[in-house]
Amino acid sequence: MSSARPHPVAVGLIGLVIVAIVVGCGAGASSVPPSNLATSSPAAGATVGPGAAPTKLVVGLGYIPSVQFAQFYLAQQKGYYAAAGLDIEFQNKIDLDLIPLVGQGAIDVGIGDGTSVIPAASNGIPVEYIATIYGMFPNIVFAKASSGITKAADLKGMKIGTPSRGGSGWTMLQALLASARLTIDDVEIIEYPTFTQRAAVEQGAVDAATGFANNEPVQLELDGGTPVVLHIDDITPLPGPGLIASKNTLETKHDAIAGFVAATLQAMDEIKAEPKVGLDAAISAVPELAKARETQAAILAATIEAWSGPAQDARGLGAIDRDGWTRSIAYLGTLGLVKHPVTTDALVREDLLPPRE
Amino acid sequence: MNRGAWLPVVGAFAFFILAWKAVVIVGGLPDYILPPPEMVAVRFVTAWADGTVWPHFVTTMIEVVLGFSVGAALGLIVGYGLARSELFERLASPYLVAAQAIPILVLAPLLVLWFGSGLLSKVVICALIVFFPVAIATMVGIRSVDRRLLELGRSLRATRRQILTTLEIPAALPNIFGGMRVGVTLAVVGAVVGEWAGASKGLAVLINLARGSLFDIPLMFATLLTIALVGVALYLVVVVAERRLVGAR
């Protein structure tokens, strides 16, 4: 007895193989960094000649539109990016997958800090830190002065609000607690996925919360409160958020990204000298911010202050504190966040920074 | 069960693994985008061995079991009421359907806000998601009981309770277990969604930690595998219970 027709199950399995290969090819094509497809684009780092197509860069800012991104808005509006031959597409959204997407090349430039870049690189995600935005680590724990909290040890047994159990704020909180020989189990965590932890502190729903030095404490103070802020910088300096890109993108779009860095730092210098231009640029980009101009001005002032740490004071905005990175790798290793060894040289690149006088 | 029955199952699983591996190789996908199956398998074993998964697994299982129990119990009661009372069905159906139409993903943060980020909110979320399929399956099952059987029971002066326990429930069991099969897998979904909305422990919390803090994508996949295995195991428990009470189908 023989069967002339193929068995239906066999046909189905063969079809599944074909689908799997097609999906793999499609995923492989999409995982190829866009820069590999733009080989005819001129390298851009300075002014591009007439007729040359601008180099497109996708920049993931990692958060919703905010005055905290004033330098990007200003550089865009004043044509600094265009002058550098760049066509910038900003992605202003909260993106938990920002760093893997940068590593994959789906996003050309992103924003990440040491608490994210170090574990990510340790787990094989090929990203590098190319310019500092925040010289001070902006993630903090804040509370009302009436809570009696003045140091990390006071957090024991307290209710602490946080947006999620992940990300830089979560790592910062663990580091802060560890400095007082506490763990997450010594506090009660209340999650506020919609970032309403400031209201929770104001209303007494929690005793303290994680936030950003240039946001929640500023708003708490403007509402008439007296905030207490616990900085991780006081315990161990962690590299603040800065510009990151994948190793592959840095090779294929080096000059374009260098131009982006230079334009962004130029805008930061201008805003630091005259904050009003940054506020106006932010309101021009996000008109809703005009409804609370005084609040936004206060947030921007705190943001500008956070741009500068000792390294930036010495060598200008954007400068990278390599020693700080080295210490941070060791410190995060003690928290179990460095799965495989990484070195500062593998994580940090300074060749994209513009020369400073 | 003879080898002829097991072979296709094992073969299909092996084929799934090979297809996964093929996608990784042909696509040139890095580990942090799609880790190969052998990497996930190793991470699965190490994560269980070093105790990473266990506390989260226990938390999720408690939520699922309690949530399913509450949801199924309520579903059985309301389903019977829907089947036997036209008035109750007319009054309750619009609200039941409306509640089911609202995505649990939208409701979950509200429920966490109302019931806290502890066990209670997760049990409520699980119960809500389990309730509807069990209630509808119960309603259909009870309504499908042959009226002649009920008439026979009444003619023999069976009490209401006797009719319920000896006629209605046994006849409706196949449908009820159909709803239970769906409900138990949805209970796992409910637990995960509830944890996503706010929790200190649980498999969904572990996924968020692996993804957002540790960047340990193999661990994330190992946790997904754990969730899948939990769903499959609970489904098989319902199937075994069904076979014992109803017989093989």
Image (tube, coloured by chain):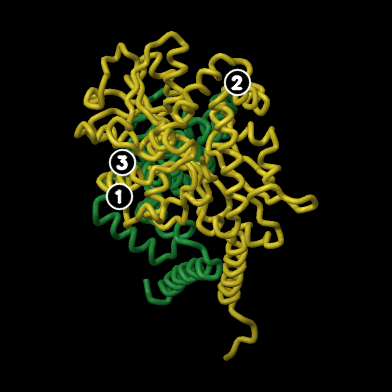
As drawn, the chain in yellow is: A
Q: Label 1 amino acid?
A: Val
Query: A306 or B112: nearer the eye?
Result: A306
The percent coordinates of residue B139 (x first, y second) are 51, 38
Q: Which quadrant: the N terminus of chain A?
A: bottom right
Residue B145: image location, x then y, percent:
51, 43
Q: Do labels 2 and 1 share a chain?
A: no
Asked where in the image residue B44 lies, by quadrant, the reply is: bottom left
Name the chain letter of the residue that bears numbered label 3.
Answer: B
Q: Which chain carries label 2?
A: A
Marks 2 and 3 sit apart, C-alpha to C-alpha, by 51 Å
Q: Is mark 1 on a helix, strand or loop?
A: loop
Identify which residue is drawn at 55% across, 18% down.
Answer: A297
The answer, for residue A140, to whether it is visible in the render is yes
For badge 2, the amino acid type reads Lys
Give residue B53's mark. Answer: 1
In the picture, residue B225 is in which quadrant?
bottom left
Q: Mark 1 or mark 3: which comes first in sequence?
A: 1
Front: mark 2 or 1: 2
The residue wearing badge 3 is B59
Observer-nearest residue: B142 or A180?
A180
In the image, the chain rendered in green is B
Furthest residue to the left?
A181
For disc 3, the neighbor class at 10 Å (few under 14, some 14 to 19, many from 20) is some
Proximity of marks 2 and 3: CB atoms separated by less than 8 Å: no
Which label belongs to residue A276?
2
Residue type beneath disc 3? Thr
A130 lies above or below B63: below
